[in-house]
Amino acid sequence: MTALFALATSLLWGLADFGGGLLTRRAPALTVVVVSQSIAAVVLGAVVVATGGWSEAGPRLWFAVAAGLVGPLALFSFYKALALGPMGVVSPLATLSVSVPVSVGLFLGERPGWTQAAGIAVAVTGVVLAGGPQLRGAAVQRQAVLLTLVAALGFGTVFVLITEASTTVTGLFLALFVQRVTNVLTGGAALYVAVRRGAPALPEGGLPLRALPAYAFVGLADVAANGTYAIAAQHGPVTVAAVLASLYPVVTSLAARGFLRERLRAVQAAGAGLALVGTLLLATG
């Protein structure tokens, strides 16, 4: 179950990142975050009411609030780093987020077997290579590196917090709703400050209604990914769940190839293959 839900997480996050990346080509990054998360919050609110999730309210929801505060900062830092580039350096660095939940799992006493340990090493190497690291001729701004490290730390922290935010399915719906509402409030405040400083809030020509389904997909895919990761981490080793969930850059690269006809470089193809091998080792270990 852990492997299945963690792989579902990587698929959903990979597609959400791909969709978010496309949207930020036409709209400010903060606008994409606020609009997509607002739609997700509305849908989750309806789910919470329908399932009676309010009965699960308790102190654990503070973990969801914390995740909602950290998430927008991580997303904004990641999008800003991608804008500064080069993407072939930024994307692999962001996979360092896996170190946070893996470290927490080891600290709590998890000890993966030799097969799983080998799978972790192979999968992480594959994810880094799948990002297409530019080892030569890549002029990297120090700000891009720092922003990417902030994003990686933030993503990894959200991994840990959302796992602790609930213990039941209905509680998970409530925790995700609280996280999204906090995301919207935090992102909205940041967007307000940006607009006050002269930054545009909307793309030229406004936000077309035909784009709303794309925003909804990004927001809901991100929510679903948080949910499947929480389930994966609660039903198995956090170290395994975190590594398998971190395969999302491979999904993003494959989506770019399938929809945008971007060609995979040899190092990216090799990385995708290693990630698959690592996944099999983790799933069977």
Image (cartoon, helix red, strand yellow):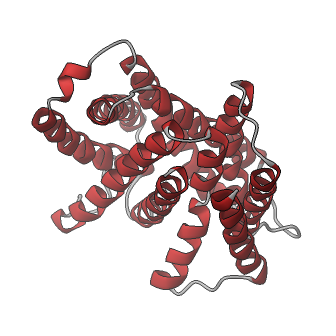
Residue drawn where x is 26% and y is 33% of the image: 170
In the foreground, 36 or 138: 36
Q: Is residue 174 above or below residue 80?
A: above
Residue drawn where x is 35% and y is 57% of the image: 218
Q: Is residue 73 above or below residue 241?
A: above
Please tell me in which quadrant of the rendered image residue 133 appears.
Answer: bottom right
In the foreground, 1 or 190: 1
In the foreground, 136 or 71: 71
Residue drawn where x is 46% and y is 32% of the image: 162
In the foreground, 257 or 239: 239
Q: Taking 91 as reference, is 211 left or right?
A: left
* Residue 129 visible in the current orientation: yes
Question: Which of the image's four quarters has the C terminus?
Answer: bottom right
Outermost residue toward the right? Answer: 136
**Residue 119, how many percent across, how many down?**
75, 58
* Residue 131 visible in the current orientation: no
Please tell me in which quadrant of the rendered image residue 247 appears.
Answer: bottom right
Please tell me in which quadrant of the rendered image residue 50 appears.
Answer: top left
Q: Is residue 170 above or below residue 245?
A: above
**Residue 58, how many percent across, how many down?**
32, 14
Q: Taking 216 as reference, is 75 left or right?
A: right
**Residue 141, how many percent across, how many down?**
76, 51
